[in-house]
Image (cartoon, rainbow, N blue to C red):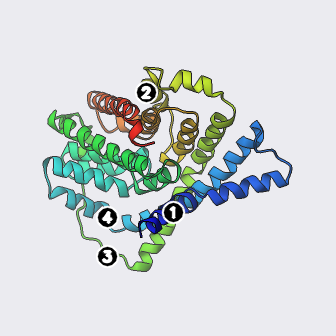
Amino acid sequence: MMSILRWIGVFIQDQVLGMKWLHQLVETMLERVGIDTASMIGGSLHFFIYDVIKIFTLLSVLIFTISYIQSFFPPERTRRILGRFQGITANTLAALLGTVTPFCSCSSIPLFIGFTSAGLPLGVTFSFLISSPLVDLGSLILLTSIFGGSIAIAYVVVGLVLAIIGGTVIEKLRLGHHIEQFVMDIPFADHETSIPTKRERLLYAKEQMVATVKKVTLYIFIGVGIGAFIHNVIPETFIQSVLGTNNAFSVVIATLLGIPMYADIFGTIPIAEALYAKGVGLGTILSFMMAVTALSLPSLIMLRKVVKPKLLTLFIFIITIGIIIIGYLFNALQFLFV
């Protein structure tokens, strides 16, 4: 019985999520048209085609499923749920609810404004703001398809912990007066909405899937392109010298490199995959991914319009330090996951 379950698990990991059949199919097709996949150009082309098809396929299914689930948690209902709890319980719930909401930090900020104007505690709204772009069901599935279930689950757990701790610290410091006044002056209409029918939920999921895929297409192509370049062009010795475990500052460098970039979790995964193949430490890779998704420069610029400089600086400091600590911790404990 255990052997059957193990076989099913491996099949799902390799063929359903990892799509190894697609990897072989792309390789066969390229070789039939005379492209050597062992060459630099052929290998890059193989990486690009395989990853693009795999990510878009998984992404479409995941966004549809997640959006259907999200239809049960409109902003008004989410606010009412969060309003029933206090303290770390509320922060934890906010972080968990962030996993079924928008997939990039810029999309999360309007909801952050709505929750804040509705009177939710500042720390709770920040736990949501951190978690929403950082952790979602899509990241769990896509990370599982590349790195395996244990690493994917570990990423989700540390992302949630960072969101909970970050929100809790901000709440304890009582910085509510550092929210821009226009946010507090926004009227919040707390009204009951009609319950969508199943058909309406499916239509909403389809619309969200199409809209999200369109929004992230460019970033996926860029991410896969960078991943293909790293995987087949940049020498492993160079990658190791900059981001390898022998460099004591690799986690800090990866975090700082990630902040100026703008992408969601789907755009960072191909880069992470290529770095992992080059022997970069797990913690260094996680730090890079977290910095890109939680601290992207465009989202920080948007957030500055909502919060005052002191609160923004504290937010950046807390998240940056948290990401760096997580990176070094996972580099030290990588043997438990690989």
Disc 2, SS: helix
Q: Residue 80: image x %, image y %?
A: 20, 61
Q: Which mark is residue 206?
A: none
Disc 1, SS: helix
Of tags 2 and 1, which is closer to the observer?
A: 1
Residue occupying the point 20% across, 56% down: 82
Q: Quadrant of the N terminus?
A: bottom left
Name the amino acid type tagged 4. Phe
Disc 4 from disc 2: Cα separation: 36 Å
Of tags 4 and 2, which is closer to the observer?
A: 2
Q: Nearer the viewer, residue 274 or 139?
A: 274
Q: Which mark is residue 251?
A: 2
Q: Quadrant of the C terminus?
A: top left
Name the amino acid type tagged 1. Ile
Report crowding for label 2: few under 14, some 14 to 19, many 20 or more residues within 10 A (C-alpha). many
User: Mark 1 vs mark 4: which is more N-terminal?
Assistant: 1
Disc 1 from disc 3: Cα separation: 35 Å
Residue occupying the point 42% across, 73% down: 201
Q: Which residue is mark 4?
A: 73
User: Mark 2 vs mark 3: which is more N-terminal?
Assistant: 3
User: Mark 1 vs mark 3: which is more N-terminal?
Assistant: 1
Q: Which residue is mark 1?
A: 12
Disc 2 from disc 1: Cα separation: 32 Å
Of tags 2 and 3, which is closer to the observer?
A: 2
Of tags 1 and 3, which is closer to the observer?
A: 1
Q: Is residue 184 above or below residue 288?
A: below
